[in-house]
Amino acid sequence: MPQAKLTDRFGRTINYVRLSVTDRCDFRCVYCMAEDMTFLPRQQVLTLEEIARLARTFTSLGAEKIRLTGGEPLVRKDIVDLVKEIGSLSLRDFAMTTNGSQLSKLAEPLKRAGLKRLNISLDSLDAERFHAITRTGQLNQVLDGIDAARGAGFEGIKLNVVVMKGRNDDEVPELIEFARRKRIDISFIEEMPLGQITGHNRGESLCTSDQVRALIHPHHELVPTTADSGGPARYYRMPNSPIRVGFISPHSHNFCATCNRVRVTVEGRLLLCLGNEHAVDLRRILRGHPVNDDKLKDTIVRAMDLKPERHHFAGDGDVQILRFMNMTGG
Ligand code: SAM
Ligand code: SF4
């Protein structure tokens, strides 16, 4: 096991990296993107080789967990090759967040390539509503993808639900029943103010984790667990089911004190915090030093000093961060 070398000014050890592999997506979820998006030109996007090099470098600096995200990671061409490359790094955990639309055909190849866990986004079980929230998505395709993922034998699968008042909050009990039936974990996420959107008012639609728990309460008792992912989710169990129910609450529960993660955008910007703009350009280093990794390692180690103590999301829906979630790498 490599020795942890990434620590910040607040004594936090950074051992978890989220790598965005594309800013593109086949969906246009209302909380994530504008309807009409301009995506990055190809030369600004890291190549798969550059992303693999980042993964190797972070691993050599003590990263034990890598998550691939986007945009939609499964729309990136040759994504399975990248998964294979990173899958060979003997990470403790190797995961992907996906909208599930391509999983029918890719779940098995991803599992074979070494991916251990999947988070699949699912905001509604009603086809029309699902289409309205994702603007382009087909619910059936995603449900088939979830079944394909279950069949492929991943170590873990979790559903992610962004809960919005007046859009899908009434479906919380049904989504819980779905997760129980499929025997997969489920997390409910508070919407974050990333990127300017026009479809709805985030302040008005914010459904806090306390409110989501109140929606579950009449149906199931939720027992807090001590499970700690080192991350923002707090987990609960139900007495008569093996699944875990997580709550990701950037507004109502500040999780910064135990933050163990950084993100790299597909342009190669190392983001030290989801809720702040602090960043370091790694693409310049990757391309300026194509053979030797010393400068890259040194830049990453020094960047940890820039990691802010905490984020300051306010619940009023005002945009504090101009980049969209698809650029951030959820
Ligand atoms: N396309 C993949 C997906 O949707 O799962 C991966 C990328 S997506 C940006 C990662 C996660 O971020 C998804 O679960 C999505 O629901 C969530 N997300 C996107 N925008 C968000 C926002 N403004 N607030 C909270 N969660 C958001
Ligand atoms: Fe695409 Fe995921 Fe953003 Fe939805 S949340 S638009 S699926 S990147």
Image (cartoon, rainbow, N blue to C red):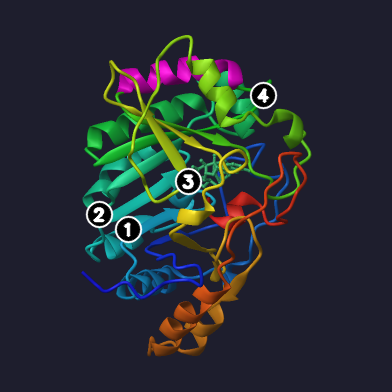
- What residue did someone put label 1 on? 83
Question: Mark 3 falls on what kind of element?
Answer: loop
Part of the protein shown in magenta? 169-182
Corner quadrant of residue 168: top right
Closer to the chain start, of discs 2 and 3, is 2
The kind of residue on which mark 1 rests is Val
Res 104 seen here: no
Q: Residues within 10 Å of mark 1 (few under 14, many from 20)?
A: many
Q: Nearer the viewer, mark 4 or mark 1?
A: 4
Residue 154, compared with residue 123, is above or below; it is: below
The earlier-in-sequence mark between 2 and 4 is 2
- In what element is the residue under mark 2? loop
- Callout in the foreground (2, 3): 3
For residue 297, say whether it is visible: yes
Mark 3 highlights which residue? Answer: 232
Q: Earlier in the sequence, mark 4 or mark 3?
A: 4
Quickly name the residue at label 4.
165
Spatial CA span between label 2 and label 3: 28 Å
Residue 287 location (% of width, % of height): 50, 84
The answer to whether residue 86 is left or right of residue 160 is left
Q: Which residue is mark 2?
A: 113
Q: Are marks 2 and 3 in contact (CB under 8 Å)?
A: no
